[in-house]
Image (cartoon, rainbow, N blue to C red):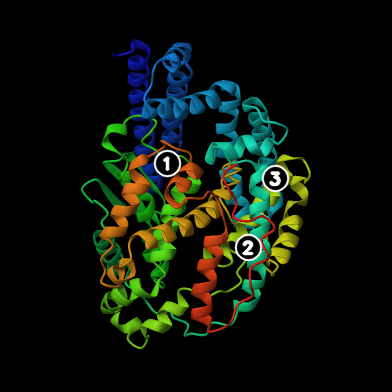
C-alpha cells in the first residue's frame, strides 16, 4: 500500500538528487574546462542553485512528510533512507540562511586570500579570513547542536556517528605506533632516484591512465576522466561519474596513483544499487568509507609488488628511455619509500596518518578556543616536529599547504586516516574470502576483488553507517590493528629490517560503541 507522505518525499528526494547532480556538473566543469573569465558568473550560478536546493530541502512540507512517513510500517531500506534524509535536513534546518550566505562569502574570500598568502609565503595575510571562517563554523556548530564539543558537529557532517571523544584516542594510538616506524624506516630504503628530471611524455601518461582505468574495470560508458590541478571524483549520477587526474611531465606518479585513487572513489559511485538511484541511499555513508575505497586501490593494490609485476612492463614500454635501466624491485621500493616530508600529499603510507594526527589535534584546539589563529603557524611547526620529526622551512611548507581550511572545511582531515584504517580491514576480509586474489592481481585480473567490493560495500550505499558496514563485512568496527599489521608486514619485507612492535594495546581491538 502506498503512503502519500512517502511518495511525496520520494518525489522531493528525486528532485534534490537532480539538483545535486547539476551542482556536481557545474563544479566539475569549474575545475576542468571553465574559461577563466567565467569564474564570477559560475560562482553566482552555483550560489543560486545551492539556495534553491536549500529551500526545497528545508521547506516545511518536507518536515511534515518525514514525520508522517516515519510513523508508517517501513522496510529496512526505506527506514534507512529516511534516516539519511532526516540527518541532512536536520543539519540544514538548524542553520539560518543568513549564516549559510555568510559562510559562502567567507569561503570565497578564504580561497582568494589563501592563494595570495601562499604566493607571498606569509600566513598573516590569510589569518583574518581564517579567523572569520572559524567564527562562522563555531556559530554553525552551535546552531546544529552538540554536547559541549563543537568539533563533533562539524565532524558529523563528513563522518556521521563519529565523535571527537572516540576519534582522538584512535589517532593518539596511531601516533605512538607510527613515530617509531618512521624512525626505523626513514632513510633505510635505498633505491635509485627515478624522477630526477627525466621527461615522461604527458600524452603517453594520459594514454597510460586511460588504459589503467580500463584494466581496473572503470565503466567509461558511465563516466569519464579529465585533467585538473587538484584531482577529484565528481559527477551527476552513478551513470555519470567524473574522475580527474593531474599530469606532471617529469614524474608519472601523480597521474598513475591519482588515477588509481580516483578510480577507487569512482568505482564506489558507479556501484550504488540502481533501485537506490535518485534517493538518499545512493551515497556513501561517510567520507571515511569513501576514502577507504580510494586508498584500497591506490595503496593496498596499487603499491603492491604483484600489481606492479603485471603493470611495470607496460609502464616501461610506455617510457622506455626513462625506465630502461630500472628494475621492477627498485621501482617498487621507490614508490613505497618512507621519507619524512613536511607535505601531506607527498607522504608515504607510514607517515601519512601522522599528518592527519597533527591537523586533527590543531582543528580540535581551534574549535575549542584553545588556540588562537595568530599562534597557528608556531603550533603547526612545533607539532610537525613532534609528530613527523621535521620543521617546515616556511608557511607554504607548513600551515598554508592544504586547501581545506581556506575553504572553511574543519572535520574533513580525520576521514583520510579513518579511510586508511578501514581500507586495511576490508582488504584483509577480501583476502580471506578470495584465496587466489594476489595470484589474479599478478595476472592483471582484478575482477573478483571488484565484485567482492561491490557485493559487500558498494551496492549497499548508505544503508548502514560506515562503521556498521565495516562491522558487517569484517566482524569488527574501527581498529588500527589491521592497518598496523599490514604496514609492518609490508615494510619489514621492503626494508629487510625488523621493525619495532606496535605499542601494547591499552584498549584491545576497538569495538562498536
Ligand atoms: Zn580521496
Determine which residue is flagged by label 3.
Answer: 364
Foreground disc of the pair 3, 1? 1
Q: Is residue 131 left or right of residue 116?
A: right
Q: Residue at position x 32%, y 49% from top?
A: 454
Residue 471 place in picture, x, y as percent = 48, 47
Determine which residue is flagged by label 1.
Answer: 284
Comparing 61 with 27, the one in front is 61
Give the Cα distance between marks 2 and 1: 32 Å
| Relative vertical location of residue 140 with respect to residue 316 in this rendering, above or below | above
Q: Is residue 317 left or right of residue 139?
A: left
Q: Residue at position x 36%, y 88% from top?
A: 325
Observer able to see residue 125 = no
Q: Secondary structure at mark 2?
A: loop
Ligand 1 lies under 8 Å from the Cβ of mark 3: no
Observer able to see residue 175 = yes
Query: Toward which corner of the image does residue 71 lie, by quadrant?
Result: top left
Residue 397, numbered label: 2
Residue 82 place in picture, x, y as percent = 43, 24
| Relative vertical location of residue 57 with respect to residue 29 in this rendering, above or below | above
Sequence-first disc among 2 and 3:
3
Q: Quadrant of the N terminus?
A: top left
Residue 375 place in picture, x, y as percent = 78, 51
Q: Secondary structure at mark 3?
A: helix
Sequence-first disc among 2 and 1:
1
Q: Residue at position x 25%, y 72% from top?
A: 443
Amino acid at each position: 500500500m502506498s503512503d502519500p507522505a512517502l511518495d511525496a518525499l520520494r518525489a522531493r528526494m528525486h528532485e534534490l538528487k537532480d539538483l545535486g547532480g547539476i551542482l556536481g556538473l557545474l563544479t566539475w566543469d569549474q575545475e576542468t574546462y571553465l574559461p577563466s573569465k567565467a569564474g564570477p558568473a559560475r560562482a553566482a550560478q552555483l550560489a543560486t542553485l545551492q539556495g534553491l536546493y536549500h529551500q526545497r530541502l528545508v521547506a516545511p512540507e518536507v518536515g511534515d512528510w518525514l514525520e508522517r512517513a516515519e510513523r508508517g510500517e517501513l522496510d529496512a531500506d526505506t527506514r534507512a533512507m529516511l534516516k539519511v534524509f532526516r540527518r541532512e535536513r536536520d543539519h540544514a534546518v538548524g542553520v539560518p540562511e543568513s549564516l549559510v550566505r555568510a559562510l559562502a562569502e567567507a569561503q570565497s574570500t578564504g580561497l582568494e586570500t589563501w592563494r595570495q598568502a601562499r604566493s607571498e609565503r606569509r600566513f598573516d595575510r590569510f589569518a583574518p579570513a581564517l579567523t572569520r571562517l572559524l567564527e562562522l563554523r563555531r556559530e554553525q556548530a552551535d546552531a546544529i547542536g552538540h554536547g559541549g564539543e563543537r568539533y563533533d558537529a562539524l565532524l558529523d557532517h563528513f563522518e556521521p556517528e563519529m565523535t571527537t571523544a572516540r576519534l582522538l584516542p584512535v589517532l593518539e594510538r596511531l601516533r605512538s605506533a607510527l613515530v617509531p616506524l618512521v624512525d626505523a624506516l626513514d632513510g633505510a630504503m635505498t633505491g635509485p632516484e627515478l624522477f630526477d628530471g627525466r621527461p615522461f611524455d604527458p600524452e603517453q601518461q594520459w594514454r597510460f591512465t586511460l588504459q589503467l582505468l580500463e584494466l581496473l574495470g572503470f565503466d567509461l560508458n558511465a563516466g569519464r576522466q579529465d585533467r585538473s590541478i587538484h584531482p577529484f571524483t565528481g559527477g551527476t549520477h552513478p551513470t555519470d561519474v567524473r574522475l580527474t587526474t593531474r599530469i606532471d611531465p617529469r614524474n608519472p606518479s601523480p597521474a598513475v596513483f591519482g588515477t588509481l585513487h580516483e578510480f577507487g572513489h569512482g568505482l564506489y559511485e558507479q556501484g550504488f544499487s540502481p533501485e537506490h538511484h535518485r534517493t538518499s541511499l545512493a551515497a556513501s555513508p561517510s567520507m571515511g568509507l569513501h576514502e577507504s575505497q580510494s586508498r584500497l586501490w591506490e595503496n593496498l593494490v596499487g603499491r603492491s609488488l604483484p600489481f606492479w609485476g603485471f603493470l611495470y612492463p607496460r609502464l616501461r614500454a610506455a617510457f622506455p628511455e626513462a625506465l630502461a635501466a630500472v628494475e621492477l624491485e627498485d621501482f617498487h621500493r621507490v614508490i613505497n619509500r618512507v621519507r619524512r616530508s613536511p607535505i601531506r600529499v607527498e607522504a608515504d603510507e607510514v607517515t601519512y596518518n601522522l599528518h592527519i594526527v597533527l591537523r586533527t589535534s590543531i582543528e580540535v584546539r581551534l574549535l575549542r578556543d584553545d588556540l588562537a589563529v595568530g599562534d597557528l603557524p608556531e603550533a603547526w611547526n612545533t607539532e610537525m616536529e613532534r609528530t613527523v620529526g621535521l620543521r617546515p622551512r616556511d608557511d607554504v611548507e607548513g600551515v598554508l599547504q592544504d586547501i581545506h581550511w581556506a575553504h572553511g572545511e574543519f572535520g574533513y582531515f580525520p576521514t583520510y586516516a579513518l579511510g586508511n584504517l578501514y581500507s586495511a580491514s576490508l582488504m584483509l576480509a577480501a583476502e580471506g574470502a578470495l584465496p587466489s586474489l594476489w595470484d589474479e592481481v599478478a595476472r592483471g585480473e582484478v575482477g573478483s576483488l571488484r565484485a567482492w567490493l561491490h557485493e559487500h560495500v558498494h551496492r549497499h550505499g548508505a544503508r548502514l553507517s560506515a562503521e556498521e558496514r565495516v562491522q558487517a563485512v569484517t566482524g569488527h568496527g574501527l581498529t588500527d590493528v589491521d592497518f598496523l599489521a599490514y604496514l609492518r608486514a609490508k615494510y619489514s619485507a621492503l626494508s629487510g629490517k625488523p621493525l619495532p612492535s606496535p605499542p601494547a594495546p591499552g584498549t584491545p581491538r576497538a569495538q562498536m560503541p
